[in-house]
Amino acid sequence: MARSQRSALQQRFTRLIVSLNRDYRKTIASKFVITLGDEFQGLLNSALIIPDLLWRLERDLPQRQFRIGVGLGTLDTPLQKYAINIDGPALHSARAAIEHAKKAKALGGIFRGFGELDDILTGIGSVLWFQRSRWTESQRNIASLLRKGMSQTEVAGRLGIKRQVVSRQVLASGFYPYIAAESAWRMILEKQADPLLGSKHGLSHSH
């Protein structure tokens, strides 16, 4: 990649992090910050937003493959406005998750520190990523609009295509089974992972 292209990509990455901090501010305990060029980290007060974060990263910056590590634990340092100069078990768990993701070439999110939920949350995230990674650009565009709550008829109107085309693409992409699985993932995150937080903070770290 040319230097100018890398610079433009880094600028888009920076804007994306700013937008994530704005759009998810209610569930961010310490704002996402870029740490080493192509890495970022932040502290969450709820794991429920993780599916949306992954979706946004892939949708808004498809040129990069993000390896996401989510660690649960406490902090040994004071909570900061931005997730810099922090340390503790939460950070260590997230780093362990990232290292595993790199070694295993795993995408879709690796979870550490959630006990017996680690494998469950990681497994569901992996299957979801596997499915959406095989979508065409058209299928991904349709899925993005349906995911926002639009009907197939509304999606067809927005994209300027026939309703039947949308229906065929939805069927071919397996969108509704995907949404059912993502809903199950959210339920586990909300009902089982979030209660583990208590006074702890889940730390999401990406490379």
Image: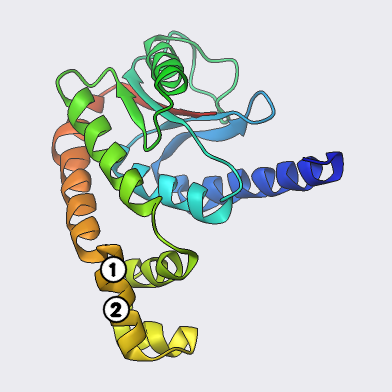
Count how many numbered circles sit on residues in the image: 2
Q: Secondary structure at mark 1?
A: helix
Quarter of the view holding residue 74:
top left
Give the residue at x 64% y 31%. Answer: 38
Q: Is residue 158 visible?
A: yes
Relative to 78, does residue 108 appear above or below in the rendering? below
Q: Relative to residue 106, is residue 25 drawn left or right?
A: right
Choose top left, top right, bottom left or bottom right for residue 190.
Answer: top left
Give how far across and how far down residue 152 sits, in percent. 30, 82
The residue wearing badge 1 is 172
* Residue that label 2 marks: 168
Give how far apart the Cα atoms at labels 2 and 1 are.
6 Å
Q: Establish if 73 lies above or below 185.
A: above
Asked whether the viewer can see residue 151, the reply is: no
Q: Quadrant of the N terminus?
A: top right
Q: Is residue 72 above or below residue 165?
A: above
How crowded is the residue under tag 1: few (<14 C-alpha within 10 Å), some, or many (20+)?
few
Q: Residue 149: which disc?
A: none
Identify which residue is drawn at 49% across, 49% down: 58
Amino acid type of disc 2?
Arg
Front residue of 193 and 141? 141
Q: Are marks 2 and 1 in contact (CB under 8 Å)?
A: yes
Q: In the image, residue 22 lies at what x, y percent?
A: 54, 51
- Residue drawn at (49%, 15%), measured in percent from left and top? 78
Within 10 angstroms of label 2, few (less than 14), some, or many (20 or more) residues? few
Q: Amino acid at mark 1?
A: Ala
Q: Position of residue 33 (x, y in %)?
A: 60, 32
**Vertical arrangement, residue 1 with respect to residue 12, above or below:** above
Q: Residue at image x 33%, y 45%?
A: 130
